[in-house]
Amino acid sequence: MFRKPFSYGQNGKRFKGPEMIRKSLNYSRIDEEYSLMLRTAVEHLRTAGYNLKINNGKRKLRPRTLKGFVPDIRALNDSDEILVDIASDAPDIRKWRRFAYTDGVRLWIIAPRSSVDSVKTCVETFSIPAEVYSCNGTLKLKRVL
């Protein structure tokens, strides 16, 4: 009989379920940037009156899988649905195309100021119908495309 391997923490305690995907306390620069952009998008959408599902590692609260991928944020309003993806170093074109071509859904891609030009180029090159936003380190979003 095949057994799944276990994941062990630093103190030797065995983790199960969602605890396996929790991040350690020493976040890198990329994780800090990601969490800042996530917080900015959440505040922006909440003030606009959207109900949010956020992918923060907790299974009950995260958005449902859509065409094989999980968005970072799923925002619902009475007449509108927005999927938000926070761009990382390697953009996932397949994921963006699947989200963008879903009926009745708008796609927002939020990128850090340093990589917003490359994300914009990818979106234009692959003709993905998405709105690209830049996050400049403060809690402000600026629409680029």
Image (cartoon, helix red, strand yellow):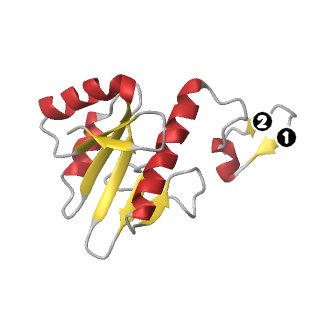
Cα distance in 3D space between marks 2 and 1: 6 Å
For image coordinates 38% across by 23% down, the residue present is 114
The residue tagged 2 is: 8
Q: Quadrant of residue 7?
A: top right
Compare residues 41 and 89 and report the one nearer the observer. Answer: 41
| Visible residue check, residue 14 | yes
Q: Which mark is residue 111?
A: none
The residue tagged 1 is: 13
Compare residues 44 and 97 and report the one nearer the observer. Answer: 44
| Visible residue check, residue 64 | no
Q: Quadrant of the N terminus?
A: top right
Mark 2 Cα-neighbour bin, 10 Å: few <14, some 14–19, many ≥20: few
For image coordinates 47% across by 41% down, the residue present is 37
The x and y percentages for residue 116 are 31, 29
8 vs 84, left or right, is right
Q: Amino acid at mark 2?
A: Tyr
Mark 1 Cα-neighbour bin, 10 Å: few <14, some 14–19, many ≥20: few
Residue 121 vs 53, above or below: the answer is above
Compare residues 129 and 140 and report the one nearer the observer. Answer: 140
145 vs 48, left or right, is left
Q: Quadrant of residue 59?
A: bottom right
The x and y percentages for residue 27 are 65, 30
Q: Amino acid at mark 1?
A: Lys
Residue 51 vs 21, above or below: the answer is below
Where disc 1 sits, the SS reads loop
126 vs 54, left or right, is left
Q: Quadrant of the C terminus?
A: top left
Q: Are marks 2 and 1 in contact (CB under 8 Å)?
A: yes
For image coordinates 53% across by 27% down, the residue present is 30
Compare residues 5 and 13 and report the one nearer the observer. Answer: 13
